[in-house]
Every structure is written in C-alpha cells, then in structure tokens.
Image (tube, helix red, strand yellow):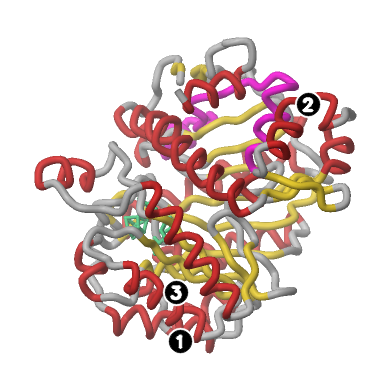
Amino acid sequence: MLTEALRRMIAHKGDRYAFEPYKTGDIDFSSLPEEIGLYIHIPFCRRLCPFCPYNKTLYNSNLAARYYRALLKELELYRPFLGGKHINSIYLGGGTPTLMMGEIALFLEKLRNEAGFQGDVGIEVHPREATPENLAAARNAGINLVSVGVQSFHGPSLSFLERGYGPEESHQGVINALKAGFETVDVDLMYNIPGQSQEDMEKDLETCLSYGVEQVSIYPLIIFPLTPLHNKIKSTGVNRFSELAEYKIQRKLERVAERYGYQRTSIWTFGKKGVKRYTSVTRETFLGLGASATSLYNRYFYLNTFDVEAYIKALDSGTMPISLVNYMNEREKQVFWLFWRCYDTEIPRRRFSHLFRASLDRNFPLLTAGLKLLGLAKDQGEVLKLTPRGTFCFHFIEKQYSLRYLNNLWDVSMQNSWPKRLEL
Ligand SMILES: C[S@@+](CC[C@H](N)C(=O)[O-])C[C@H]1O[C@@H](n2cnc3c(N)ncnc32)[C@H](O)[C@@H]1O
Ligand code: SF4
C-alpha cells in the first residue's frame, strides 16, 4: 500500500513510473545545467559480498584497462556540452574505486586541466584497500573526502556479511584514513545484521565515534531480493529485529551519536558540527559516467547499461551507453527533489521557490500540512524540518523505495544490457 502511494505521488494521477529505452536524439545534452556534480562508477571488486545490490564484477586488470579507455570516450562524448559549465564536485563510487587509483588520478588531472575542475572529490574505500599507499595516492590525486566501508568492528557480524576481513582490519582502515589527512573521513556501518545484539550495534557506533571521525553513515542491513543473501536467508531462515524494534534501536543510536557531539545530517548520517559533509546521493543535478551510472538534470533521470562489456562496446562504436530514461514532468521533478530533501531531513522552501518558480505550500498543501499535523515535521524558519518520528517514517519509505523500485530497476538492468520499457 505504501509503495503504491509512493508510486502515485511520484507519477501523479496514477500514471506509471516508467523508464523508456534510450534512442539517439532522445536527450537534449545541451540542457546540462550550469552547475553539475559528476559521479564516476568503478564496477570492480576483489570479492563479491552477498548482501551488496550494486553493480559490480570481479576485478581483472585487462578489463579495467579497457574500461578506463571507455570512460575517457564517454567523457569525450559529453565534452561539447560541458564547455562553460561548472563541475562542482566529483564522487567516485563502486565497486571498489581504489582498484583503479592510477587511472583515477589521471582522469582527475584531465578534468582539472581541460575542464577547469576545482571542487570536492569523494571516494569510497574498502577497508582492505585502505592502505597508507592507496590513501596517500588518493590525497595526491586531490581527493579530499573519503568513506571507509567498515560495516562493523564485530567479528561475527563481519563473518555473517562474508567481508573477508576481521575487526583488526576494520580498526586499521579507520586509523589509516584518519592519518592520511582527508578533510572528511566518513565510516559506513550497518546494523540489524543477523546475530548482532543491540549492545553490539551500540558498541560499533561508540567505537567508531571514539576515533573522532568527521562523519558516520549507519544503515540498517537491507535484504535486497536481487542479492544472494536474500536466497540464503530464505533457505536457512534468520532472526532479525522487527521494524518497530529497529525504530527503537535507531533512537538509541541517535542518542549515542548526540552523546559524542554528533548531529544528524541526513536520515542515515551523523556528523561533527561544521565539517564538510560526505554525500553520494543528494546532489540536485549530476552527470554519471561508467557502467550503471545514473544522471539527473533538466527533465531526465537516466541510467547507463550495467554490463561492462556492453558499456565498452557502445563507446567503441561512438554511441552513448545510456540504457533507460525516465522523462519527468514538472511535478515529478518536484517530487524527486522533495524525496531527496526528506533524505536530508530538511526541506528549504526558498530553494524550492527558486528552482521551480512555485510555492511549496501551494503545490503540496496536503503534504506540508499533513506532515506537521502528524508531528512528522515542524517549521524551523523557512525550512520544514523532519522530527525524529518523521525521520523514522522516512527511513521506512526509503527502504521501501530501495526494495521496490531500485531493486527492480537494478535487477532488470543486471539481467539485460539493454532492457525494454520498464514500468515500476
Ligand atoms: C557501494 S557500497 C560499498 C563501498 C565499498 N565497496 C566497500 O565495500 O567498502 C557503499 C555502502 O553501502 C552500504 N550497503 C551496501 N549494501 C547494503 C545493504 N544491503 N543494506 C544496507 N546498506 C548497504 C554499505 O555500508 C557500504 O559501505
Ligand atoms: S559491498 Fe563493496 S566490496 Fe562488497 S561487493 Fe559491494 S561494492 Fe564490492
């Protein structure tokens, strides 16, 4: 019921939320905005974690070299439309981006020299790759924000997740990242891992915060139906905390973070006051490069093909590797923006007016009044701020969005390099 309501809210008037196969000429690339973030996807990992829904494949140096050449070609295809535009940030995600650290350094240098790029660069680092050498190479390449995918400091939790390392490497990864001189060190943790007690979860967070990292991202483990973990759990059965218990745990974790002087900066993150936030998903507009990368600007939300070989082949023949496009009408653009502002836990009304030349309260009277009436949000100056109860409700909605929409979109895209029309 909730996902149906979400679908109706996104698509409005019961239209389907649909992705169409891309055809040359369908997208007006010259409508790239003046200010844009760049997302670069590196789809290689040394081993594949059973819980991970992201697009990735086992690392192979030959394939990685061919992939890098394809990335350069994709950038060349966009170059005529990037002239005079300002790339304001770069985010390197995966997969395991550090497996291509040398190529990334060259790519960033190219963007600085040829496109005048100046701005924040963030990178995801797997703890086993968080060596002093890799981190120094990232710093030398001008990367200033890092996220270490620790997940847990608790041996049995790491074993359940089949991460291939133990608590010692979790600790060392954080220590190395802190020593390397980044502006922001973020650590990813997961909770509600089968077998983890509430005390284990609190201890993980306390351990992390006592290192003094700038930010912690703490996600409940989501069992995506497209992942091997889903089948494992279905066949073996497993005990996890219920949604309600998860809510209570979240409140406890929030109090732990506050005790250490951290503030909530999004539904999943806590940060030290005044530090630069590490964020992958909340930019208003971004251009994605690489297999499975998504782009969002003007009225377009589109995805590249997930298949690495298909991606390389498309670029070898000089065509854009775009597989599916969602064309947004004005209302869908506004809903999409609102969705990500709820993720930030605050909706700035003035920004809405500036972007859409309309009033938030006039366009979404039921939403703004309803949120306040139900105690899910309150006015804080011009900002509509989610309350803790609102934050929890949005946790739930975000999980449903991931499980229902992202899971299906990614699953179809992993099964088929060039999917047919897709209705979600
Ligand atoms: C792209 S992933 C991983 C980055 C890096 N490859 C690593 O493994 O450390 C970014 C983060 O998403 C989170 N994540 C991945 N799968 C998840 C799932 N099934 N449920 C909740 N969070 C997940 C993890 O915390 C992970 O660090
Ligand atoms: S969690 Fe990280 S290392 Fe594991 S498969 Fe996903 S991207 Fe690769």
Dot placed on the residue nearer the N-terminal end, 1 or 3: 1
Mark identifier at residue 205: 3
Mark identifier at residue 313: none
Which residue is at a point 30% across and 49% down the rendered structure image? Answer: 57
Give whichever of 112, 284 is nearer the camera.
Answer: 284
Dot placed on the residue nearer the N-terminal end, 1 or 2: 1
Question: Quick check: 155 above or below 233?
Answer: below
Judging from the image, what secondary structure is the residue with disc 3 in?
Answer: helix
Residue 334 on the magenta span: yes
Q: Give the residue pinned by disc 2.
A: 365
Q: Is residue 177 left or right of residue 242?
A: right
Mark 3 against mark 2, which lies toward the viewer?
Answer: 2
Residue 301 in sight: yes
Amino acid beneath label 3: Leu
Cβ atoms under marks 3 and 2 closer than 8 Å: no
- Quadrant of the rendered image holding ligand 1: bottom left
The location of residue 242, given as percent across then percent down, is 33, 48
User: Which of the 4 quarters of the picture holds residue 89?
Assistant: bottom right
Which residue is at a point 44% across and 54% down the rendered structure image? Answer: 94
- Binning the other alpha carbons within 10 Å of mark 2 as few (below 14), some (14 to 19) or many (20 upward) gives few
**Which region of the structure is painted magenta?**
311-340
Q: Give the residue pinned by disc 1.
A: 175
Dot placed on the residue nearer the N-terminal end, 3 or 2: 3
Which residue is at a point 54% across and 66% down the rendered structure image? Answer: 254
